[in-house]
Structures are given as structure tokens and as C-alpha cells.
Image (tube, rainbow, N blue to C red):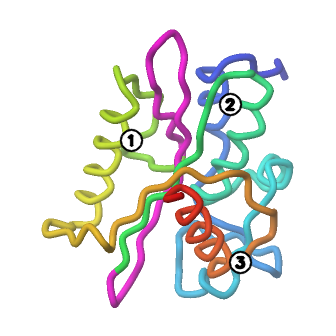
């Protein structure tokens, strides 16, 4: 197989990765189900390459590995909206090239692709709105919505540990 050289080639190569997760027993789940909170663990990029499955959290780590090789300027983002009943989230990768900003998206099927923006501010506003719309969030308490940059987390974090990691990243972004 030809080695991936560009973000566009990476997106094509990722078509073989399905949305879902591997539980601690090695079973594949093709949706975020009732077992996710207890059975999920964050895969490394190499584990995603082998398993060919991952939620957005896993897929961003897979993308991170290739973007580091590209030498492109990139950041990874976490967005979450906290309610009493749930806390939907999404992770995604943003890169800069030729004076433009790009949202690299594979795991969120309806928005899959590489989307170009004139500014990072416009990109983040668009992703934020799409996220809120996709969860039917019309009236939003800004204190419950978090959108932050995060660095590479340790592999094998569980669901709750991943959220705790993101909360720490959020605090780092505020300083």
C-alpha cells in the first residue's frame, strides 16, 4: 500500500476505519452503547490501524500520528455540552495550510471531509454550531459548553478518565 503523504490521502485511507469502539474484552461495538462508559478505552494510533474501528477520540489520535509526519501545523479539539442527563462530546483536528484553516473530519459521517475556512475563528464557530444542532441544543448555557485544544493523551484512558483529561486541558487553555 502506498504511504499516505497528504491530508487528502489520509482521508481516503481512513475510509476503511469504522465508527465504534473495542471493549476491554476485545469485542467490537459499532455504536456508543450502554457499555461504553465502563468498557471503552482510548486506542493508540497503531491499535486503530490494527482494529480498523474507533470513535472520534480514537480516530483523532490516528490522525495525529500522520499529521505529525506531514509536518503541518495542527491542533486537536474537544467539544462537550454538559447537561444533567448527558454530556455529548466530539473531538476533531484542525490544520493550517497556505493561509487557510481546515477542519479534518472522518468520524462524524454527515460532516466527513476536509473543510476550508478563512480563519480559525470561523472554523470553530461552524463546528460548534453543527455540534449544537446535531444534539438538538437550541438554548445553550455557555457555562455548560466547552471547546478546547488538547495535547496527545495517554493511550488506554477509560471514558471518565478521558473527560477528566479534557477538563485539565480546558484549565490549561484558560491560563
Q: Is residue 102 above or below residue 168?
A: above
Percent x, y for residue 88? Answer: 41, 71
Image quarter of residue 21? bottom right
Callout 3: SS: loop
Q: Is residue 44 above or below residue 135?
A: above
Of mark 2 and mark 1, the one earlier in the sequence is 2
Of mark 1 and mark 3, the one earlier in the sequence is 1
- Residue indicated by mark 2: 13
- Residue indicated by mark 3: 158
Where does the N terminus fall, quadrant-wise? top right
- Residue indicated by mark 1: 111
Classed neighbour count for the residue bearing mark 3: other residues with Cα under 10 Å, few (<14), some (14–19), many (≥20): some
The residue at 65%/70% (across/down) is: 165
- The rendered magenta stretch, by its main secondary structure, is classed as strand
Q: Which of the pair 156/9 is nearer the observer?
A: 156
Q: Which of the pair 38/29 is nearer the observer?
A: 38
The residue at 32%/82% (across/down) is: 83
Percent x, y for residue 90? Answer: 48, 59
Drawn side of residue 147 relative to residue 131, left or right: right
Percent x, y for residue 127? Answer: 35, 45
How far is mark 2 from mark 3, CA to CA? Answer: 27 Å
As for residue 94 lying within the magenta part, the answer is yes
Where does the C terminus fall, quadrant-wise? bottom right
Amino acid at each position: 500500500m502506498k504511504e499516505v503523504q497528504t491530508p487528502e490521502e489520509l482521508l481516503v485511507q481512513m475510509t476503511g476505519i469504522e465508527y465504534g469502539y473495542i471493549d476491554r474484552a476485545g469485542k467490537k461495538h459499532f455504536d456508543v452503547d450502554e457499555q461504553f462508559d465502563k468498557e471503552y478505552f482510548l486506542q493508540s494510533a497503531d491499535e486503530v490501524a490494527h482494529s480498523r474501528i474507533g470513535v472520534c477520540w480514537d480516530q483523532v489520535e490516528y490522525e495525529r500520528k500522520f499529521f505529525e509526519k506531514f509536518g503541518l501545523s495542527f491542533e486537536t479539539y474537544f467539544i462537550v455540552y454538559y447537561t444533567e442527563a448527558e454530556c455529548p462530546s466530539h473531538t476533531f483536528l484542525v490544520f493550517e495550510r497556505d493561509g487557510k484553516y481546515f477542519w479534518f473530519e472522518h468520524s462524524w459521517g454527515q460532516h466527513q471531509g476536509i473543510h476550508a475556512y478563512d480563519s480559525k475563528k470561523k472554523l470553530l464557530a461552524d463546528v460548534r454550531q453543527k455540534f449544537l444542532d446535531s444534539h438538538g441544543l437550541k438554548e445553550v448555557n455557555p457555562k455548560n459548553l466547552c471547546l478546547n485544544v488538547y495535547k496527545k493523551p495517554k493511550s488506554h484512558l477509560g471514558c471518565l478518565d478521558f473527560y477528566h483529561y479534557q477538563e485539565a486541558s480546558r484549565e490549561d487553555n484558560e491560563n
